[in-house]
Amino acid sequence: MDASTNATEYGGYDYNYDDEVCDKGEVVKFGSIAIPVFFSVVITLSLTGNILVLVILALYENLKSLTNIFILNLAISDLVFTAGLPFWAIYHIWGWILADILCNIVTFIFFTGFYSSVLFLTIMTIHRYLAVVYPLSDLGTQRICYGVAVSLMLWAISVGAAMPALLFSSVTNIHHKGTESWSCEYKDSLWKYVSTYQQNIFFLVAFAVMGFCYVRILGKIARTRSHMKNRTVKLIFCIVAVFFIGWVPYNVTIFLRMLADHLLPPFDVCEVSTRIDYAFYVCRLIAFSHCCLNPVFYAFVGVRFRSHLKSILHRMFSRQSPVEEHQVRMYNIHSNGSMY
């Protein structure tokens, strides 16, 4: 099957290639090359980074720390999100060639990982805000109970938000210029628009909360004389910048594509619609790379986490003496704090 015959986008975003006036075959051909290549890189980096996070948590850390509980859930969330990427990479090359039920399952898993990742990034920001601005708060008095309860609640919200993808996705046959391909999309255009609004709302709420928290954190840090102030400010700036650059263009383009579906001026012009589609491909590639960047900003920047990572690499490439192994074990026993 020719890749250019793949006429739809997963998650309910579709192209009407039967319209001879606006043939977007070149757009799809671009996606069939760029997306599988880029997703392959993202999948490799995400698996490596997030699995390392889980290994370090299992070997060196305990889950009495609220931060570690949220980092654990964020890593699992990113892995769930990553699990859907290979299927979409194949989809962009050959169309949907798998069983019909897998269309529903893969889309559901993908969006569950997508929403849970955004939610855990947000709750980690709130937790960091409370720890810095209200350091005497009794939020952490029941850390394990609180962390587990909040995590379960966020996973429940994520599953609920992704449920329409499980219930209303389907495989449809697309005919174009004498050829046919199979697509995985929403049965009803209504749910396609609901999905777009839902993603936009999740982003706006998360960005508003993160923006407020980090502004307050920066204000608190600016009044201190800590030697770590400059490093902390740079880290916060990088986190906010990456989140903004990654997700703002993506959410803008999916909203513009929805307007193009309604043929509203000026999006009813073929050239404008095609440019939006190209922009959507590029912006989505940038946004979806968050699953391999999260371990860097939320784990690897920690001094203790980097120390644990060095220990793992050292043990992989050299043999430790019994004395060194005993020292590492004793360090782990007496280390009960978070990675920050």
Image (cartoon, rainbow, N blue to C red):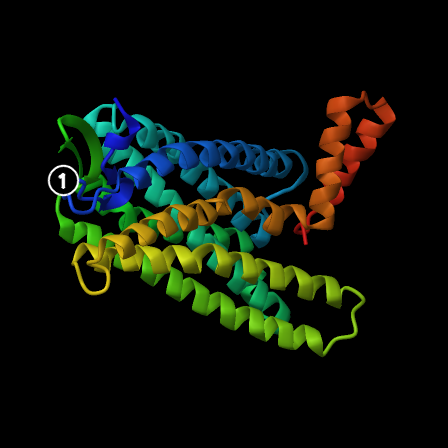
Residue type for callout 1: Asp
Q: Position of residue 30 (x, y in %)?
A: 37, 37
- 202 versus 70 height, above or below: below
- 264 versus 92 height, above or below: below
- 245 versus 102 height, above or below: below
Tell me what residue is drawn at x 54 percent, y 65 percent.
139
* Front in this rendered view, residue 8 or 105: 8
Tell me what residue is drawn at x 50 percent, y 66 percent.
210
Tell me what residue is drawn at x 45 percent, y 35 percent.
39
Q: Quadrant of residue 170?
A: top left
Q: Position of residue 79 (x, y in %)?
A: 46, 37
* Pointer 1 local density, CA inside 10 Å: few below 14, some 14–19, many at least 20: some
- 153 versus 17 height, above or below: below
Horizontal side, residue 117 vs residue 178: left or right: right
Horizontal side, residue 320 vs residue 268: left or right: right
Q: Is residue 151 visible?
A: no
Q: Quadrant of residue 23?
A: top left
Quarter of the N terminus within the rendering: top left
Q: Position of residue 253 (x, y in %)?
A: 34, 56
Name the residue carrying label 1: 18
Tell me what residue is drawn at x 14 percent, y 50 percent.
189
Q: Is residue 59 visible?
A: yes
Horizontal side, residue 252 vs residue 209: left or right: left
Q: Position of residue 271 (x, y in %)?
A: 27, 54
Quarter of the C terminus within the rendering: bottom right
